[in-house]
Amino acid sequence: MSNPKRSKIIAGNWKMHKNRSEAKALAEAIGHGVKGEKDLPIVVLFPPFTSLAAVGDVLRDTPVDLGAQNMDHHDGGAYTGEVSPTMLIDLGVEYILIGHSERRQFFGETNASVNLKLKAALKHALKPIVCVGESLDERENNLTDAVVRRQVGAALADLEVEELKTLIVAYEPVWAIGTGKTCEAAEANRVCALIRATINDCFRSDESTQIGDSIPILYGGSVKPSTIDEQLQQSDLDGALVGGASLTAEDFLPLIKSAQKRIRSLISV
Ligand code: 13P
């Protein structure tokens, strides 16, 4: 059964979409849609950097939190074009995406840079969502488990259990992102369980901890209102990291409602 103690999370990654006025309008519609609601999941919006301040203003009196899609791991300095953790915090950012597959694929991010960014996020008390997932080629060559294990292990290198209280992981198979092809719910759940076990393995020497059991693990990849209910029924899947379906309130609000329904069903058990 799903662990009711783990937070349920619906996160919207807007990627490189929405100018400032569009972003404000979407944040307003989402904020309005959840106003006064109880038993909500954690809801986080990840607008582009250029709209963080505007969206942050809109979300201030709502239960919806603000996240950023990327950051540099340095505190500051001569790093043209980059944005530091403290700059994000200054804008009211609470969550940070780390190692999204598009960053790995198009912007040269590696398991090593993911580790540096995770350490920087934890140092500055930004809540990290570390993204992992295999490519189509890797899946077809039966490398899914090895790739995911390696990505998780490398992300957590040199970290202590006590530092991971705010960690969130997102399993996003690259072949399911933006393709309309959702990973079958049972298979997504299997990989989420593998991620949990891998996190526990990383800290095996500390027998008192089963930290992996308390970390929320999200699924991402063509999540939409028609897929979310089955996904949220899975024992090891605690929410969704959503791209395309986070770009309109009509698609995104039903995802939040589904998580709310799931939370209520877990409370009543
Ligand atoms: P889609 O929901 O558009 O497949 O994107 C998923 C994703 O990459 C979220 O980070």
Image: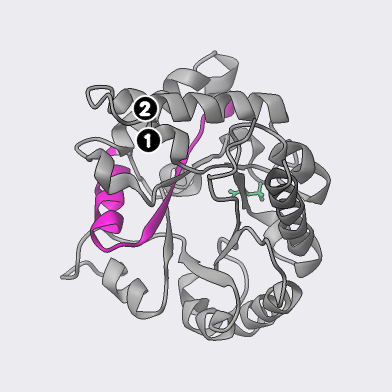
Of marks 1 and 2, which one's residue comes earlier in the chain? 2
* Percent position of residue 175, x then y: 62, 34
Q: Nearer the viewer, residue 49 or 57?
A: 57
Relative to the observer, which residue lies in front, 9 or 263? 263
Q: Residue at x 70, y 64 (%)?
A: 247
- For residue 71, the mark is none
Asked whether residue 84 is in view, the answer is no
Front residue of 147 and 3: 3
Q: Secondary structure at mark 2?
A: helix
According to the picture, the residue beneath numbered tag 1 turns out to be 211
Q: What is the x, y in percent for residue 1?
A: 65, 30
Boundaries of the magenta span: 112-136
Question: Please, which colouring scheme is shown?
Answer: one colour
Q: Farthest residue to the left: give it.
A: 77
| Residue 119 sits above or below residue 208 on the image | below
Q: Position of residue 111 (x, y in %)?
A: 32, 37
Q: Position of residue 98 (x, y in %)?
A: 40, 51
Q: Residue at x 57, y 21 (%)?
A: 139
Q: Is residue 78 left or right of residue 133?
A: left
Mark 1 and mark 2 in contact? Answer it, CB < 8 Å.
Answer: yes
Q: Which residue is mark 2?
A: 200
Let me know if residue 265 appears in the view. yes
Based on the picture, tell me whether residue 118 belongs to the magenta stretch: yes
- Kindly tell me whether mark 2's CB lies below 8 Å from ligand 1: no
- What amino acid type is highlighted by mark number 2? Asn
Quick check: 140 above or below 166? above
